[in-house]
Image: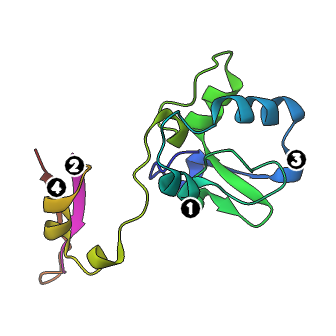
Amino acid sequence: MCDELTFLELVQQISTDSISLKLKDKMHKVLKAPEGMDPELRKHYLIEGQFLSNILLSPRGAFEGGINICKTCMQSLNSKSDKPPQLAIANGLCIGELPNEFKDLRQVEMALCSMVRLIKGIIWLKKIFFFSTLLFVVLN
């Protein structure tokens, strides 16, 4: 549903067989592609499967026979709202996949040419003597 990086404790694995008819109907209603979405970008988020066709899902969230749904998306789908979850791909938060020309870039180079700007990040530094250090980076 979304490409949010989250903790495993906040993700629910659901097999496609165990999804209720009500939830399937809601997913088809709110997780369809927004009008005017580029066809190539749309292809990136369409997952093959019985009921999964025409639903925009993160390829990283689908597995053989099921999908991963984060807590935020599940709460939104279980609500009475007819809007897609806040961070859902169907809500226009889709960026696709990086072209091969950019695959070997360093983190700083990627940040310079990125269409999406990272607000906060954590970088793990090498162990210095007996200490491990974390560096918090804020990019504006």
| Outermost residue toward the top in this view | 80
Give the mark, 4 or 3, whose residue is nearer the N terminus: 3
Q: Earlier in the sequence, mark 3 or mark 1?
A: 3
Stretch of the chain drawn in magenta: 117-126
Label ID, residue 105: none
Label annotation for residue 18:
3
For the residue marked with disc 3, what is the amino acid? Ser
Relative depth, front residue between 117 and 90:
90
- Residue 121 within the magenta-colored segment of the rendering: yes
* As drawn, 15 above or below 123: above
Q: Are marks 4 and 2 in contact (CB under 8 Å)?
A: no
Check disc 2: other Cα within 10 Å, few if <14, some if 14-19, many if 20+.
Answer: few
**Element type at marker 3?**
helix
Residue 138 forms part of the magenta stretch: no
Return the residue nearer the eye: 39 or 117: 39
| Cβ–Cβ under 8 Å for marks 4 and 3 | no
Q: How many marks?
A: 4
What is the quadrant of residue 30 in the picture?
top right
**SS label for mark 4:** strand
**Tag 4: residue type?**
Phe
**Residue annotated with mark 4:** 136
- Who is closer to the viewer here, 59 or 71? 59
Q: Residues within 10 Å of mark 1 (few under 14, many from 20)?
A: few
Mark 1: amino acid: Arg
Say whether disc 3 or disc 2 marks the residue closer to the N-terminus. Answer: 3
